[in-house]
Image (tube, coloured by chain):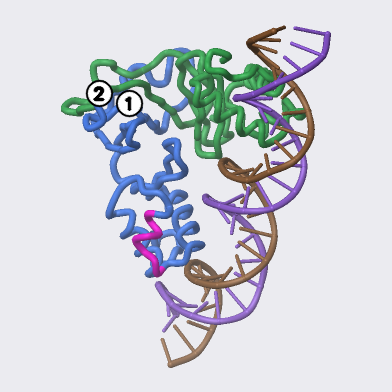
Chain colours: A green, B blue, C purple, D brown
Amino acid sequence: MRGGGYKATPQRMAVLGALAEEQHQSLEEIRGRCLEVGLVTVYRTLSLLVELGIVRRLDLGDGARYELAEDHHHHMICESCGDISEFEECPLDPERLPPENADFEVRSHSLEVYGRCGACR
Amino acid sequence: MRGGGYKATPQRMAVLGALAEEQHQSLEEIRGRCLEVGLVTVYRTLSLLVELGIVRRLDLGDGARYELAEDHHHHMICESCGDISEFEECPLDPERLPPENADFEVRSHSLEVYGRCGACR
DNA sequence: GAGCTAATTGAAAAACATTTTCGATTAGCG
DNA sequence: CGCTAATCGAAAATGTTTTTCAATTAGCTC
């Protein structure tokens, strides 16, 4: 983070701390965990972190959500209760990416699975 | 559409027509194709169509996009020029969904691939 | 540790996106 | 043709994100 000439301010540390507490939080949830940081700064810090690749921005249907990008994982979203859970195991067949005949250099992907969680069935 | 007691108004037909012209359009693009329909009605019609399962709502990083949900497909997004292309062939291994040990009933999924398109390399 | 400077912050305002309200209009029925 | 619930549109309200700009501060230098 300092490499790029960015300062390690208490506000940025607070936002990172909030992100570390739970994955895929909305901006309001993050803000709730660091009330001492101004709203504008939360917005700015999140877009900086996304730009630096430290944080991933999601959109699972309801507005934006953010999570630390440390590990590769995917989401299962329950259409009934809205619960979001994660799984590591990537069910993609690497042989089939990029798709045949596509002139495309794959760098990353995101996969979301929708359905019903155990509790809702 | 009529089954549920909904009326087939010219405005709704116009929005559907706009959606048929191109996939994954933003609301502004859709609106540009049916200027005779009020903005509020475009919003309302799109959320109705999404609710009915006729239209899919996407978020590929820039705001909301909409497309007819007739066929199952995925998106490749060029991180350089922003171009969005589609592919049908699903590279998911059905054996691995839901992931092991997950108590989850899978109903659908969405997959987006990010990278660089042929033109940008 | 004090001083300097560019980066950062926060409050207010601006810009943009979406939803609500409510009176006027209309599709689809008999 | 007439009726009525559904729909529409314009304005206002609400919600979200960005910009502006003066004040503050992290991190460097000495």
Residue B92 in picture, x, y percent from top left: 31, 23
Q: In the picture, residue C23 is in which quadrant?
A: bottom right
Q: Is residue A118 visible?
A: no
In the rendered view, tell whether residue B73 sits above or below residue A3.
Answer: below
Which quarter of the figure is the C terminus of chain A placed in? top right
> Residue flagged by tag 2: what amino acid is it?
Pro
In the rendered view, tell whether residue B101 sits above or below residue A64.
Answer: above
B40 horizontally vs B111: left or right: right
Q: Count the marks: how many?
A: 2
Q: Are marks 2 and 1 in contact (CB under 8 Å)?
A: yes
Q: In the picture, residue B82 is in which quadrant?
A: top left
Please report the bounds of the magenta region as a residue range.
Answer: B29-36
- Check residue A95 for magenta coloring: no
Q: Name which residue lies at 69% across and 36% down.
A: A39
Q: Is residue B115 visible?
A: yes
Residue A57 in picture, x, y percent from top left: 51, 29
> Residue flagged by tag 1: what amino acid is it?
Gly
In the rendered view, tell whether residue A65 sits above or below residue B50.
Answer: above
Q: Is the magenta stretch mostly helix, strand or loop?
A: helix
- Check disc 1 and report the residue beneath it: B115
Residue B84 vs residue B67, the one in the foreground: B84
The residues bearing labels 2 and 1 have C-alpha atoms spaced at a distance of 10 Å
Local crowd size for mark 1, using a 10 Å CA cut-off: few (<14), some (14–19), many (≥20): some
- Check disc 2 and report the residue beneath it: A98
Q: Name which residue lies at 55% across and 39% down.
A: A62
In the rendered view, tell whether residue A120 sits above or below residue C12.
Answer: above
Q: Name which residue lies at 58% across and 34% down.
A: A81
Residue B6 in picture, x, y percent from top left: 44, 63
